[in-house]
Amino acid sequence: MTDLSTIYKICLVAITCFLHACSSSSSSCPELECWFVQEKVGRGGGLTPATTQEKSLLYIGTDTNGRGAASRQTPSDIHPDKVYFVTDPAATLCHRSLSRPRGSVKKPQCEISPFLHAPSSLRWVAPLTDSGLSPVYLQADWFSAALQGFNKQLVISSVMRAPTATKEPNVILSVTSKTVSVQARLGKPVLLDCGFWLDPSSPLSRSGFAVEWRYQFRGKGHLVLAYDGKTDRVADSQEEGAALDYEALHKKGNASLTLQEARVRHSGMYICTVYLPYLLAQVALELEIVEPPSLSIQPSPLPLAVPGQTLIVQCDASGFAPLSLELSWEFKGADGKSRPLGAGSVTGHRQALDGTYSQSTRLELDTSKVDLGTGGELTCVAVHPGGTRRASTPLSVIGFSSPSVEDSMAMVGVALVLYGLIKLVSWTCFSSDVAEKHEKKEN
Ligand SMILES: *[C@@H]1O[C@H](CO)[C@@H](O)[C@H](O)[C@H]1NC(C)=O
């Protein structure tokens, strides 16, 4: 009887623990320390910064019940006015990369600022607000937050709405990317991740959305693709081979861009923007096309090296990007040991039509100064962000020593074989000649 009640108790404890674990994991959204960035009011110009920064704290919950405002202890260095209780039903802001790992000095980055809603005049966004009447719903406090998780695992941009002066914003639109910095090989397909969530209960999500991808590099930029979700049409596309998956876009909020074939000119910044009427959120991604070089050594094969002579060898590296290459030479002797021979004289770079680079290095190998022994292997080494490449060629030194016994035996052997061959050939020809003459006579 006591046994049964013990088991019962243990079960009860286990269940309680389990429930507790569940509830605590569902509310495991981090508290986010953010910089509250605001434009300075009435700034006098000159050298004063245009914005002010203040520490702020964001408590995140996935529903409004989770707001345990009273039970929290706000750090003393944060003004109570800059503490917000954010509701994020999609739990985008609860990503694990946003919690600060124990003992880590680095923090996830977070910035929040007031957001100014406005209708957009862009051709693919304007239809969203074509009624021209701004809804009462917009009369509230709007914020935008930009976050970056640890190790660039994730970037998030969210737009939030708080009923005026409540400090309790709700996330209305979130745009995320898990590919903050992408490297791709030349000619391969590229996926630039972008996903979004919009609050289905918001009146703004009823009129549809628009998606835009822009490219930017060194101050210049262009539109890659613009999609008008209201009319379900691609409004503009200026990059061949760039595509969205329209089904995934509508069903899952997957706005990822694929580039069919990576080219060098694709390297740069990509900005994914999602528009709702009067609102927008955007994330930026970096794409770098990284292709290691192909190497070739000239002349190939190398001429036999005569001791005392200077041997000139060239190594050509081509088809690489970006322009960051270190060329050098190595010699590996018969003893298996590698010796560095330096960089040689490296030429300037050239750029091919496809944007890839080429560069060469010329080695003047003074055989009287470098101990090459009986020869070995000469290697050209190219260190590139895309990987290290090597090209090798055998290097033989003649007149280094008199032929060994084995060499002499081999020479005799070769001579004998040659002699035999000549004999055989001449005998065959001669005998067939005789046979032919015989035949002719008989005819
Ligand atoms: C989004 O779509 C792309 C294809 O366009 C796919 O490769 C990717 O896995 C999708 N992402 C998610 C999170 O479903």
Image (tube, rainbow, N blue to C red):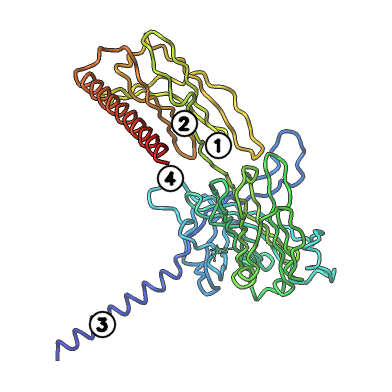
How many residues crowd mark 1 within 10 Å: few (<14), some (14–19), many (20+)? many
Earlier sequence position, callout 2 versus callout 1: 1
Earlier sequence position, callout 3 versus callout 2: 3
Q: Are circles 4 and 1 on residues that touch, CB within 8 Å? A: no
Q: How many marks?
A: 4
Earlier sequence position, callout 4 versus callout 3: 3
Instruction: Judge by depth and name the residue closer to the eye, 271 or 101.
Output: 271
Q: Name the residue that disc number 4 marks.
A: 105
Amino acid carrying label 2: it is Ala
Q: Name the residue that disc number 1 marks.
A: 320
Where does the N terminus fall, quadrant-wise?
Answer: bottom left
Label at residue 11: 3
Kindly report which numbered mark, 4 or 1, lies closer to the viewer in this rendering.
1
Kindly report which numbered mark, 3 or 2, lies closer to the viewer in this rendering.
2
Instruction: Judge by depth and name the residue closer to the eye, 395 or 95.
Output: 395
How many residues crowd mark 3 within 10 Å: few (<14), some (14–19), many (20+)? few
